[in-house]
Each structure stands twice: as C-alpha cells, then as structure tokens.
Amino acid sequence: MAVKKIPLTVVGGFLGAGKTTLLNNLLQTTSGRRIAVLVNDFGPINIDTQLIAQHEGETISLTNGCICCSIGSGLDAALIDVLSRDPQPDWVVIESSGVSDPAPIASVGLTEPSLKLAGVVTVIDAEQIQTQAADPLLHDTIEAQIQGADLLILNKTDLLAAEALAQCRAFIEQRYGALPIYETSHGQVDETLLFEVDETPVLARDGAMQHAPASDHPFETALWTGQGTLSADGLMAYFRRLPRGVFRAKGFVRTDYHGWVSIQFAGRRLQFLPVGQSDDSALTQNQIVFIQAPDAVDLTTLAADLDQLTVASNE
C-alpha cells in the first residue's frame, strides 16, 4: 500500500488581494478536514474566539481540529511542527508573502516526502489588477505570482460592474493565457476547489460521463469511466486543452507508459502518481472525476475525447 501523502496548497497573491480573508474562511468553515494553515503573521487572522481551543507560542489550535501556525521562525520549522503532530493534518496550506513568488514555496511539496503538491492558488484583486500589472515597480511581482499559479481566484468582483468585470477577465486571459479563473468576493471559496477532488462516486457504465450526486459546494462534478489502456501522451495533451472552467480532476487510469497510476490535475499541472500493489490489484477500469463551473464543458464531447485515447485493451 502506498504511503498516503498530505496535500499542500500554496496561496499567493499581492498585498490586499484577499489571501488572509480566504484563509480565515477556510479555518472557520472546513467540513471535517484538519487543516494546518501556515501564515506569515497572526495579526490579520481573525479567528472566532469560540473556535480557539489553545494558543501556544506560534500555534493556535482550533476546536474543529485545524491549526494556524506562524512561520515567523522560518518555514522549515513551522512545517516540522505541523507534520510532527498527532494526528497529522489532512491538508497543509501555506500563505506566501504578498510581495513574493509562491513557486519556491510550492517546491516544498515536490521535495518533502510526506507532502504532495495539490496546487498553487493566486488571489487577484479584480479592481486593482490592471493598474498593478501596468506599474513598473509591481509588474515583475504580479507576473511571477500569476504565471506560477494553477488556479486564479478573482476576488472582490463585487466592486466591479458587469462590463468592467468582463474587461478584467479579458485582460487576464489575453495577458496570461489559459489559466482557470474562479470569480468570488470577500474571499468566499469552497474548500473543495482548493483541496482536491476527493469524492468517491458510484462508478458509471463503461465509457460514460455522468454527473456525480449533488453536493453542497457550488460546483459541478462529473465522472468518466472506461476500459482499456490510455495513451499517456494523449492524456497530457487532453488536459492541456481543457477550458478554464474545469478547475480540477482526479482519478485512476492505466496508461501505455505508466501502467496503473493515480492522476491529479490542477490548472496547468498534471501529475501521474504511482499506486501501491494492493491498490493496483483492485483497479479494474479507468475513472476520472472532474470538478468544474456549471456547464463549463459539453460532457458528451469530454467523454468522447477520452474514449479516443484508448490504445489497447486490458484483456
């Protein structure tokens, strides 16, 4: 059985974009996951005092099982602290400084054996992004924060009229390319979007694309299943072509290069992860769960494109 790794999400974005508000929401509204949030400064974190179980040094323990840890003593020390706790967190979220590039922090998820990188999320101030990107003093920082992201959270959309918001989206898409963009205000982002696709849906018939049962998050979940061995190169090209409205995907597939693997898709990043032998023996068909904006894609076309990637039978 493969060792289960803890997902790591890095939250970046320029000063004032709404990162801390987003983290506040996560800490107070999590649905049963033990989140460890590593922040630069406790000061802006506004945790409901009724949620605080204990405040010890640079760590605040909450009654819902979450912890908030300051990285004032260094990121390595903070990670050692949260990863050595019993029980361990289900999810680690690191807030990148508002004037830094989140990519170097994300590399921790690729090098720390107990972590896996779930994605880099960059929060954008919808009202300010065009002005910031045009400022020669801020340009390089803004570029790095957005170009290194897997998902863009376009925050403070309530401050723009519909036409101005459409112009903002067009500016981002033209300047930065095919990054998925999620619009919100007041940092309201469902944890399902940031964590990973972890539903365990009932398997559909072979080669089918179905909506998974309705859930309490504001996204649409779809499931594809199919038989056979898929082209690894074709899968990578397929995920690169997905529209911005498809935020994440997760599943198990058999490819012509890897054999049975778990796949994780976040933004522009597709990972093929090995599965243990006991997991391998239980796998009988390919299955991928997608999480997306409502009606983001034509599900029939999505399924047909996946079906065409089959290069051999499993028989």
Image: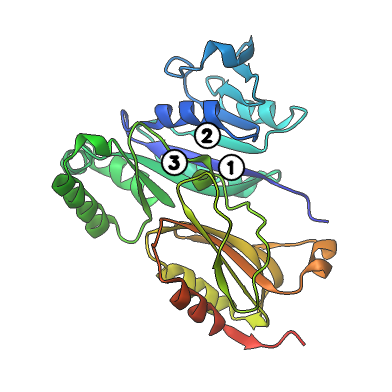
Instruction: Report, in whole angstroms, how far the alpha carbon at label 1 lies from the one at label 3.
Output: 12 Å
The residue tagged 2 is 94
Q: Quadrant of residue 262?
A: bottom right
Which amino acid, mark 3? Answer: Pro
Q: Earlier in the sequence, mark 2 or mark 1?
A: 1
The residue tagged 1 is 8
Q: Earlier in the sequence, mark 2 or mark 3?
A: 2
- Whether residue 216 sits left or right of residue 151 in the image: it is right
Q: Which residue occupies the foreground of this view, 102 or 245?
A: 245
Question: SS of the residue at dot 1?
Answer: strand
Q: Position of residue 86 (x, y in %)?
A: 78, 28
Which amino acid, mark 1? Answer: Leu
Q: Are marks 2 and 1 in contact (CB under 8 Å)?
A: yes
Q: Which residue occupies the foreground of this view, 252 or 160?
A: 160
Q: Which mark is residue 102?
A: 3
Instruction: Report, in whole angstroms, how far the alpha carbon at label 2 lies from the one at label 1.
Output: 8 Å
